[in-house]
Amino acid sequence: MTQEQWELPPSVWQGIDRGGPLPVYQQLAGALERAIRDEVLPAGARLENEVALSDRLGISRPTVRRAIQDLVDKGLLVRRPGVGTTVVHGRVMRGAELTSLHADLERMGQHPSTTLLGHEVVAANDGQSVGLGIEVGTPVLHLRRIRLAEGTPIALLDNVMAPDLADLDVGVLEERSLYSLLQDRGVAVRVARQRISARTATAAEGRLLGVRSGTALLTADRTGFDAVGRAVEFGQHLYLADRYSFEVTLVSR
């Protein structure tokens, strides 16, 4: 992901009419949105800061701020502490088919990478035991990872594995998906049961994902089953809501 600060060409702003019937902030937001849609302002580019943009265009800073906030609300821009305002990479649309997030990002050309936060064998707690259908206290491998797209965090992944998979070679998870690692062991996840919800990020989660506390997150609790119906992994995943969505096809009976 490029973090270069982009100064847009004057042609982007030529249509703004300060005396026109449409509020200036809406005209500015529209000009920025067209620049993003036309890839004049490409995905990952860092926008000029509000002060510089205000000075260059001769538009008040509150007007610039409101225009930018409109695009943040639409999911086209994202504000990141210490980074600035950047153009959002294409939203990850995940269908109902069973795939890994790593594979979805590769398919969309978003260059996935992973930061392995931790891995250890622990005693399964109540939620993990229910997810895997095992006794509380059973030793399981616990994994925590951050998934990135184009170098930007998109998801926080928390997984526990079935007891016989506690010896997985987790060192390769920074380059590969968990499901591909399972396939190396002859384990294919054929069916998954998933519950999707939403909540806001805690301060600790925000620090890991590079967003503010209270940012909207999608949650997915998922148990993956092999061909004989055995639960092999239980995941509790958090996704940035402005970067990720689920798509399901509904059919009438």
Image: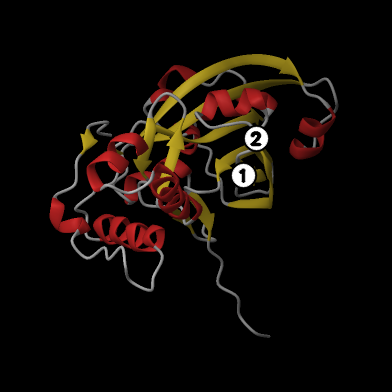
Farthest residue, direction bottom: 253
**Residue beneath the point at 42% across and 23% down:** 82
Q: Is residue 182 above or below residue 60?
A: above
**Residue beneath the point at 28% across and 34% down:** 1
Q: Which residue is labeled 2 in the image?
A: 201
Q: Position of residue 228 (x, y in %)?
A: 65, 48
What color scheme is it?
secondary structure
Is any part of residue 25 visible from this angle? yes
Q: Is residue 33 above or below residue 222?
A: below
Name which residue type carries label 2.
Ala
Q: Is residue 88 above or below residue 136?
A: below
**Residue beneath the point at 54% across and 61% down:** 96
Q: Which residue is labeled 1 in the image?
A: 216
Q: Nearer the viewer, residue 5 or 3?
A: 5
The image shows a total of numbered marks equal to 2
Q: Nearer the viewer, residue 116 or 80?
A: 80
Q: Position of residue 111 (x, y in %)?
A: 31, 38
Dot 1 lies on which element? strand
Mark 2 crowd level (few <14, some 14–19, many ≥20, 10 Å Cα): many
**Residue beneath the point at 34% across and 63% down:** 27
Quarter of the picture holding the C terminus: bottom right
Name which residue type carries label 1.
Ala
129 left or right of 200 in image: right
Which tag, 2 or 1, sits closer to the chain's start?
2
